[in-house]
Amino acid sequence: MFINKEKNGGGPLIDIGVHVLDASLHVLGFPKPIAVSGQTYQKFGKRKDVLGLMGQWDYKNFTVEDFAVGLVRFEGGATLTLESSFVANLENDVFSFQIFGDKGGAQYDPLKMYAEQNKTLLDITPVHLPRDAQPTTRK
């Protein structure tokens, strides 16, 4: 079960966060990390009065973190922050990532893209994206 560190190996980062991390790294072209730091917390899992997405878990045997945050620095100056949680005080589940650059930005789910032109931020979200016939390979 996902709440047991011995069986799952860890909490939300290992269970669900790796998918957002992989998607983010894919979009960034798998840059080389040069430094990583992170922190985990167990604030909700041991509490009887908190319900997760799948209802009440066995809070007496909850042995993993319920929130993880990380910072990765890459060659070339890019940084990535990552947050993953089994339970958080948010309105909706979020499975997304954002990219911020000096000329524009983008977010995934829903896809939105922005660019600066003529001192104005424009929504340049494509209506249709063709499927890429060549798979991206890691370097």
Image (cartoon, rainbow, N blue to C red):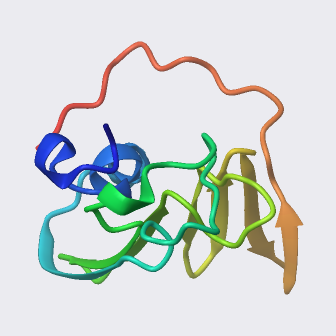
Tell me the quadrant of the picture where the C terminus can be found: top left
| In the image: residue 43, left or right of residue 126 | left
Report the number of numbered marks: 0
Q: Quadrant of residue 41?
A: bottom left
Tell me the quadrant of the picture where the N terminus can be found: top left
Residue 99, x across and y down, in percent: 55, 66
| In the image: residue 17, left or right of residue 51 | left
- Tell me if residue 86 comes above or below residue 131 in the rendering: below
Decide if residue 93 is in sight here. Answer: yes
- Tell me if residue 73 comes above or below residue 127 in the rendering: below
The residue at 84%/75% (across/down) is: 121
Residue 10, x across and y down, in percent: 22, 55
Q: Quadrant of residue 127?
A: top right
Residue 55, x across and y down, in percent: 63, 44
- Tell me if residue 132 comes above or below residue 92 in the rendering: above
Between 65 and 56, the one lying in front of the other is: 56
